[in-house]
Amino acid sequence: MARPLPPRPFLYPIVDVATLGTRPGGAAVAGLVPGGAKLAQFLGKGLPDRRFLELAAEALAAARRGGAMLVVNDRPDVALILGADGVHLGQDDLDPRDVRGLLPPGALLGVSTHDLPQLERASGAPVDYVAIGPVFPTRTKAAPEPVVGVEMVRRARALTSRPLVAIGGITESNAGSVVDAGADGVAVVSALLAEADLSGAFRRLEKALRAGA
């Protein structure tokens, strides 16, 4: 049995090294946990392998100290080396069926999707949650996928019984609408990492989520 996801609606911070700039990933996780973060994802696109491993290890140590879970983006090898709590895959990454076979029992496995056919395929794989997005315009990625909108979240909810995570351009002002459309969780990068007070930002955004539940 996989580790349980936080209760719905949950806020899922993505600790993106590129967005953090000079702020250490471990420090970011340590800042999020006092605000109530129970699950975070480490993202380090384009980093050399050893640097990725080093920064992911720091993020995992901070999560462990705070009693939170950490999922590693794209890299099941790093997740296995560190004993992280799971892996998140994109559409161009390894097949989730193959990755599930590599992971230990109980590890979390999630997949990003950007349209309904992708979501249906992911829902049929041995995953613990599926993500849909970008729901709103986002500047986190240099070349983001087309915006899917809140209505796509509603349609995705009708198609899958898997826990559904919405991502992309989500802020305090629109988070409630995404939860109202059926998302179980909301993954956020910029709306949290751009703030100096990470724990305060987490609390405010989580309050906005609960207002839509």
Image (spheres, rainbow, N blue to C red):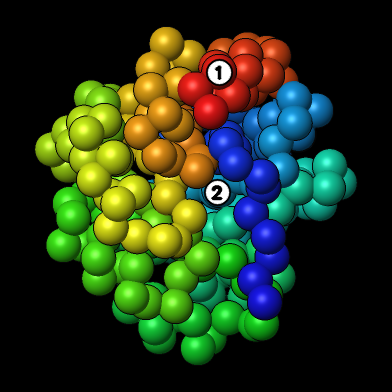
Q: Earlier in the sequence, mark 2 or mark 1?
A: 2
- Residue situated in front as seen by the camera: 69 or 28: 69
Residue at x 23%, y 45% (from the top left corner): 155
User: Residue 208: x percent and y percent?
Assistant: 55, 17
Q: CA distance from mark 2 to mark 1?
A: 27 Å
Q: Is residue 104 visible?
A: yes
Which residue is tagged 1?
211
Task: Tell me if 102 is positioned left or right of 57 in this view.
Answer: left
Q: Is residue 207 above or below residue 84?
A: above
Counting from the top left corner in percent of width and height, residue 196 is at 63, 12
Could you tell me the amino acid type at mark 2? Phe
145 sits to left or right of 30? left
Image vertical order of residue 40 relative to residue 35, above or below: below
Instruction: Identify whether 9 is placed above or below 212.
Output: below
Find residue 192 and name its label.
none
Residue type (three-letter) at the residue carrying disc 1:
Ala
- Residue 119, x across and y down, in percent: 26, 60
Q: Residue at x 33, y 55 (%)?
A: 112
Quarter the N terminus occupies = bottom right
